[in-house]
Amino acid sequence: MSFTITLSPSGHQFQVEADETILDAAIRQDIGLPYGCRNGFCGSCIATLLSGEIEYPEGEPDKLLDASDDACLPCQAVPASDVELKVKEIETPKEIEPRIMPVKVAKIDHLADDVVRIYLKLPDEQRLQFMAGQYLDFILEDGRRRAFSIASAPHDDGFIELHIRHVDGGAFTDWAFTQMKEKTILRIEAPLGAFTLNEESDRPMLFIAGGTGFAPIKSQIEHAFHADINHPMELYWGVRAQPDLYLPDLPSQWAKEQDDFRFVPVLSEPEQDWNGRKGWVHEAVLEDHDNLADYDIYMAGPPPMIKAARDTFRAAGVPDDQMYYDSFEYAGD
């Protein structure tokens, strides 16, 4: 048996399955309820119960709910009927307040000679709410900051996935590649940035990644799949040589699983045995599309790539408000 949740004042509705919490169902269906932990500790998700009945299978969290009968904690509440809640939904990045939090390095994978993937774990009583395409800052002991895009999708919030490229002269990336160990404790501020999907648009989606610009693009694509955004999608990933496609099997798997998804890797300095696309990634996009103005274009990568693509696409008739981008400035010390 499932029940319908209606949100006020938006009127949005979604279904909650048997024994599923209201918050888990909202996240599963891309409904922007606020939260900070998903386990009853922080109270960030408290809503007002306007009608219907709810239950708390784990026991009512008295410390977070006031004495009135109309307070509801969606991360713990399971509906016993159709329910109407009054709550302020999260619809834009500005509505998520960045937080400074400790994280633990849970896993380290070296994906290429100059790219490492790390998984960060928040304390058990915390979760990070963010939108696909946002980033975090590491706050170093001397107060300096280093920014990295979040590669995991918002619904998959057990760990925070990052792709870190080694930067010559960069003390932080030198340390990350040679000294960082699992269980290391770091400090972050997140979420940050406004490079997010326009989910109200009905245009096909064109994603362009340069190097580790694949990280926020990965988050956006996986979110689009999860949210059932049924638009045609194309991913062009531009790198120098084939080893720089540090997760080549993942977009290839997307293309197998999704009928309306296409993946095109583009190499600027390919090996002799490379039979795929060659040259600059934005030029490959232009060669393949006579109607770029029909697309929403999402780009992430180094500043020269972003500038060249933006100028070229603008000249091809793409309106500025259909181009979304995150320009990676690699910080050296």
Image: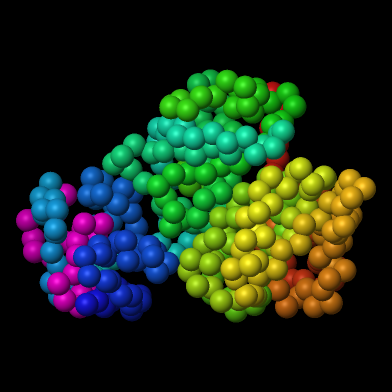
Q: Position of residue 98 (x, y in %)?
A: 44, 45
Task: Please name the colour scheme applied to the rendered image.
Answer: rainbow
Residue 243, above or below 310 = above
Q: Residue at x 43, y 27 (%)?
A: 183
Magenta-drawn stretch contains 80: yes
The image quarter in which residue 218 lies = bottom right
Quarter occupied by the C terminus: top right
Residue found at the far front of this picture = 273
Q: Is residue 143 left or right of residue 55?
A: right
Q: Main secondary structure of the magenta part?
A: loop
Residue 89: in sight, yes or no? no
Q: Residue at x 82, y 45 (%)?
A: 241
Q: Can the viewer see residue 28 in this picture?
A: yes
Specify start and end residues of the magenta stretch as a single range: 64-84
The answer to whether residue 122 is left or right of residue 249 is left
Q: Quadrant of the N terminus?
A: bottom left
Could you say where residue 18 lies in the image, as x and y percent from the top left? 22, 70
Which residue occupies the extreme right position in the image?
272
Say whether residue 273 is magenta. no
Q: Residue at x 16, y 49 (%)?
A: 64
Instruction: State which quadrant residue 229 falls in.
Output: bottom right
Q: Nearer the viewer, residue 270 or 65?
A: 270
Q: How many marks?
A: 0
Residue 195 on image: x %, y %? 59, 56
Q: Position of residue 220 (x, y in %)?
A: 57, 59
- Is 99 drawn above or below residue 232 in the view shown? above
Residue at 35%, 62% (x, y): give it: 33
